[in-house]
Amino acid sequence: MSKLIFVNLPVADLDRADAFYQAIGAVKNPQFSDHTASCMVLSETIHAMLLTHDKFRQFTPKKIADARETTEVLICLSAGSREEVDDVVAKAAVAGGRADPGPKQDHGFMYGRSFEDPDGHIWEVMWMDLEAAKAAMADMANA
């Protein structure tokens, strides 16, 4: 069985967060959602658990970081192509997020961009040509 990942994110407005993540392609799983949390399925193995601040506080004694002011985590999703990277970031911008809070990365064999959700959480989206990456790493090791 594949391991699953559940990224738990505190959100200020659950309805707004739901709408944002659905706009970028996530599917809400009602089985694990209620008025305090939404389980957004990004793939068969990746889920974003959107939690109200009150719900999030039940899982940690620490202060909730304001992701607009501090970096709590960088989350990276793979994409199947350069075009898919651009498409996800464009959808995020249209849905109320901010495109490219950091620089675009284009190394030929690897292409990445990022977006910030309405709560300030940064998501990176990255495509990589694995064969070209292996060749580039071998060239660097032999230099």
Image (cartoon, rainbow, N blue to C red):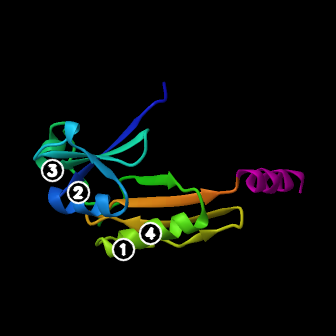
Quickly name the residue at label 1: 93
From the viewer's perspective, is 62 left or right of 113? left
Closer to the chain start, of discs 4 and 2, is: 2
Specify whether residue 34 is painted magenta.
Answer: no
The numbered dot on residue 18 is 2
From the viewer's perspective, is 92 left or right of 87? left
Residue appearing at x 39%, y 49% in the figure:
42
Residue 101 lies, with reference to residue 10, above or below; the image says below
Residue 100 lies, with reference to residue 141, above or below; the image says below
**The residue under label 3 is which amino acid type?**
His
The numbered dot on residue 89 is 4
From the image, state whether disc 2 or disc 3 is nearer to you: 2
Inter-mark Cα distance, 1 to 4:
6 Å
Report if the CB atoms under discs 1 and 3 are less than 8 Å apart: no
**The residue under label 2 is which amino acid type?**
Asp
Closer to the chain start, of discs 1 and 3, is: 3
**The residue under label 1 is which amino acid type?**
Ala
From the image, state whether disc 4 or disc 3 is nearer to you: 4
Inter-mark Cα distance, 4 to 3:
26 Å
Q: In this rendering, does residue 60 appear at all? A: no
